[in-house]
Amino acid sequence: MKLTLRVWRQKNAGAEGAMSTYEVDDISPDMSFLEMLDVLNEQLILSGEEPVAFDHDCREGICGACSLVINGDAHGPERTTTCQLHMRSFKDGDTIDIEPWRASAFPVIKDLVVDRSAFDRIIQAGGYITAPTGAAPEAHATPVPKADADFAFEHAECIGCGACVAACPNGAAMLFTSAKVNHLNVLPQGAPERESRVLDMVAQMDAEGFGGCTLTGECATACPKGIPLMSITSMNKEWLRATRKAGKR
Amino acid sequence: MARTVWDSSVGKKTVMAVSGVIMLLYLVAHVIGNLKIFFGPDEFNHYGHWLRTVGEPFMHYEWTLWLIRVVLVVAVVAHATSAYQLSRRDLKARPTKYVHSKPRASYATRTMRWGGVILGLFIVWHVLDLTTGTVHSGGFQEGHPYQNVVDTFSTWYGNVIYIVAMLALGLHIRHGFWSAAQTLGVGSRARDRALKTVANVLALLLTAGFIAVPVGVMTGVVS
C-alpha cells in the first residue's frame, strides 16, 4: 500500500505546530497502525529528519498508552486502540490525517504526544480504596453480588487512554471519571469512601480544566473498551447522592 | 451545599436539568391553554381571565399567576446562567479544533446552545408582544387575548418569529429532556428507549400544538 500521511508536528509544548505531509510505500495491510508509523520514522531517520514522536507501550490494546486522532476519530475508524488498528482498515492511495488528542487539560508535549497526567491526579483524588496491603485476601471473605461484580468489571475495563476526552467536543473527562467512580463505588471494598470518592474526583476533574458533559455520546462511541454512556448517568446519581448526604452532616 | 452544587460542573448541570423540567411542565400547561383558541373568543378569553383568579379565595386576584411568573423567571435565569457558564468552560477545555473534523452528534444536540439563545430572545419578544403589549402590532387590548393573538399572527414577522422559535423549542426538548434524565441520574439502560420516546413525543406534541395557533390564524380557522 502507498499512503499519504498528514501528521501534526510540534517541536515542543511552547512551539507552534503544523500538519506535515509524508509519503510511505510498501505498507502491508497486516501491519498495525503503529508499525506503519515505525516505517515512517525509519524513513525519516535515514533521511536525517526528526522522527515523529508518539506514545505507545504494550501494543496489545491493554495499557492505554497509545493515542492518535486518525481522520478525525480517536484511535481511528475501528473500535479499538490505535495499536490494534490494522492497515487493512485503509485503502491503497489513502490520505490519512494524524493528530494528537486535543484538550486544554492534555497539552501537547511534542508532535503526537500529550501530557495525560491530569488523569493521574483524578485517580489520586479518590480512584483507589484505602486498605492495608499484604497478601491477597481470601476471595470468599467479601461476597459481591453477580450483578454488581459485572457492573464493576464493565467499568474497570477503562484503560485511561483519554480517547473519551479527545472525542468530546467539550474536552470533558466525564466518561473516564465515571468509569473509575462506578468501578469502585459498587463494590463493598469501595463502600467506605463511596461519597468522598465521587465528590473529590469530580472536583479534581473540574480543577484540571476539563469541560462539562453535554451528552453528545462521542466519548462512548470512541471508547476502545466500550464503557457505556450510561456510566455518566450512574456517576451523576452517585454525585447527587453524595452531595445530599454531605449536606445532612 | 448550594455552593458545592453551583461550583461543580455536575452540579450546574443539575441546576440546568431541574430548571429545564420546571419550564417543560409549564409549557405542557401552556400548550393546553393555547389550544382553547380553537373553541372561540369566549372560551379563550374566559380561560385568560380564569388564569388570574386561580386559587381564589385563598389567593388574591393574580397572586397565583405572579407566583408562577416568579418561578419561571428564576428558572429561566438559572437555566441561562448555568448554560452560559458551562459553555464557557466547555469552549475553554477544547480550544484547538481538529484539522480533520466531521459533523458529529445529532442536529438537536449540536443546536442546543444557539437554539437556547433563540428561545431566550423569543421569550423576551413573546412577553413584550402578548403580555405587556409593548411591541404588539395593532392596538393591544388588556383582557382580550383572543384578538391580541389574531393580531400577532396577522403579521408575517409574527408568524416567522413564532414558528422558527417553536421548531427550535422542539429540537431543544428532544435533546434536553433525555439529557436532564441522565443528569438527574434517573436514566438507565432499561429505561433508555422509553426516555427517548417520551422526549420525542413531548417535542413533537409541544411544537405541533404551539404552531397550530399561527397556522389556524393564517388559514382563517381562527379569526
Image (cartoon, rainbow, N blue to C red):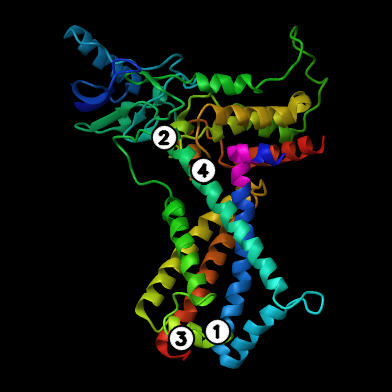
Q: Residues within 10 Å of mark 1 (few under 14, many from 20)?
A: many
Which segment did they paint magenta? Answer: B6-14
Task: Check the picture and name the quadrant holding the C terminus of chain A.
Answer: top right
Q: What amino acid is at disc 4?
A: Gln
Q: Disc 4 and disc 2: Cα gap in Å?
A: 15 Å
Based on the picture, tell me whether residue B8 belongs to the magenta stretch: yes
Question: Residue A143's quadrant in the figure?
Answer: top right
Q: Looking at the picture, do discs 4 and 2 lie on one chain?
A: yes
As drawn, A157 above or below B75: above
Q: What amino acid type is highlighted by mark number 2?
A: Arg
* In this rendering, the label closer to the viewer, 4 or 2: 4
Q: Residue A187: x percent and y percent?
A: 74, 28
Residue A58: x and y, percent?
46, 14
Mark 3 and mark 2: span between their CA atoms? 50 Å
Q: Position of residue A239 (x, y in %)?
A: 68, 37
Tell me whether the residue at label 4 lies in contact with that at label 1, contact meaning CB atoms closer than 8 angstroms.
no
Image: B212 above or below A63:
below
Q: Chain of mark 3?
A: B
Mark 2 — residue?
B94
Answer left or right for A24 relative to A34: left
Q: Check disc 3 and report its element: helix, strand or loop.
A: loop
Q: Which mark is residue B19?
A: none
How many numbered badges does the structure rendering display?
4
The quarter of the picture where residue B198 lies is: bottom right
* Lower sequence index among marks 3 and 4: 4
Q: Residue at x 61, y 57 (%)?
A: B75
Question: What is the spatial separation of the Cα atoms under label 3 and label 4, in whole angstroms?
Answer: 40 Å
The amino acid beneath tag 1 is Pro
Task: Residue at 46%, 69% (x, y): give it.
Answer: B125
